[in-house]
Image (cartoon, helix red, strand yellow):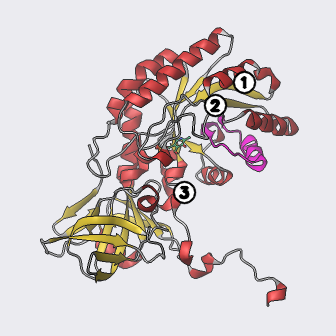
Amino acid sequence: MLIHEFRYKGSDLYCEGVKLADLVDEVGTPCYVYSYKTFIEHFERLKKAFGSIQPLICYSMKACSNLALVRALVKKGAGLDIVSGGELFRAKKALCRGEKVVFAGVGKSDGEIRKALEVGVLLFNVESESELNAIQRIASSLKKRTSAALRLNPNIGAGGHAYTTTGGYLSKFGIDFETAQTLFLKRYRWPDVHLCGVHVHIGSQILETRPFVEALKRTLKFIEKIRLRGVKIQYLDFGGGLGIIYDRERAQSPADYAQGLVPFFRKSKCKIILEPGRFISGNSGVFLTKVQYVKPTAKKRFIIVDGAMNDLVRPALYGSFHDIFPVRRNGQARKILADVVGPVCESGDFLAKDRRLPEVNEGEYLAVLSAGAYGFSMSSNYNSRPRAAEVLVKGSRFYVIRRRELLNDLVRGERIPAFLR
Ligand SMILES: Cc1ncc(COP(=O)(O)O)c(C=O)c1O
């Protein structure tokens, strides 16, 4: 069931109690708008579904890492799943305690490992033997100890797109069971790394419970096997991946998801960690953009908007579908077939292709729905476009939680050497 707080009242699209046309008048476009209520409710729904086992829910910051949103979840008791030193920096700014942070990623640098050891993260989710060596070397030099989980690759891939499928032996992620067993058995080689957990994340935008259950069954078998060899496994971090509704998907509810997994989680006798990203932020955000020009051609009609692939790359990168609604209905009942495209110099720069939309005029605004996950966080300055503003709506008030970038932000840190002056 699609649950969010973006609805029409009369002709106007609202986020909670805020008329988006009013918001746009003040903030301009392009911008991202997030509903606080939707964001928090998704976290609470997941928490409730798993209430019987009280997992640590570590929001996966990569989905949408604005400090205000991250802080909102931290205040509600969430932990954080990070994948870089930058996300660790944000986690600290959002006042998340180290013992609620899990650190994933195949290529952690020495600097990132050092910082995470200093902060005292709950778990490093380790992806290779070389990474274990690096953590041991740095921990020993800092006279610190840490806990770690091995990220397993259960050879099950699932997800909305090949690029978001992270299980399967052709993926760079995780460690196969045999290698993982060898590493657990020689764990004393890393005396400052307490190897006491397993981590699994098989992909993103997964709509059914089956691949999760299958991956979990294999993981459980693995845990049982290495426990028999004397290895103590305390944590089972089962990653994220829960799919959401963008179009007409039939996504599993948190209750279905929990029902499928909880029996196995119980059996594991581990502290369970979950890392949802998209499920919490995806339907909580929309991307607002203005129609600059309408360009009919012999073959196609293009609606050229001021938002582009640099702001929301999912359609270009994954061919993703995002529903598009007018911010104010203009009374035209007729629907027309059009491509919604941005100003970036790439043919891949589109937000929708061959889409039937209500006829829109130049100067009107469109809302691109379900843009809260992997939207702003994947945005860039390509074509030297300042990044969009981000706005948080709570009730009938809204707050600019990231100001629109200025031209000077584009060249921040750049230098012209003396010989070119
Ligand atoms: C290790 C890990 N955990 C959690 C997530 C979040 O996934 P999702 O947004 O699909 O819940 C990701 C996403 O790529 C990930 O790589």
For badge 1, the amino acid type reads Leu
Farthest front residue in view:
298
Could you classify mark 3 by the number of other residues whose Cα lies within 10 Å: few (under 14), some (14-19), or many (20 or more)? some
Asked whether, in this view, residue 296 is left or right of residue 48, the answer is left
Disc on the earlier residue, 2 or 3? 3
Q: Are marks 1 and 2 in contact (CB under 8 Å)?
A: yes
Magenta span contains residue 234: no
Asked whether, in this view, residue 25 is left or right of residue 271, the answer is left
Residue 92 at x, y = what percent? Answer: 64, 50
Q: What residue is pinned by disc 3?
A: 67
Disc on the earlier residue, 1 or 3? 3
Measured in 3D between alpha carbons, the distance from the residue under mark 1 to the one under mark 3, in whole angstroms, is: 37 Å
Magenta extent:
99-126
Residue under the point 45% across and 64% down: 312
Q: What residue is pinned by disc 2?
A: 175
For badge 2, the amino acid type reads Ile
Residue 221 at x, y = what percent? Answer: 54, 16
Query: Is residue 18 at least partly visible in the picture?
Result: no
For badge 3, the amino acid type reads Leu
Residue 300 at x, y = what percent? Answer: 27, 75
Q: How many marks?
A: 3
Farthest top residue in view:
228
- Could you say whether the residue bearing mark 1 is in a helix, strand or loop? helix
Measured in 3D between alpha carbons, the distance from the residue under mark 2 to the one under mark 3, in whole angstroms, is: 32 Å
- Could you say whether the residue bearing mark 3 is in a helix, strand or loop? helix
Q: What residue is pinned by disc 1?
A: 183
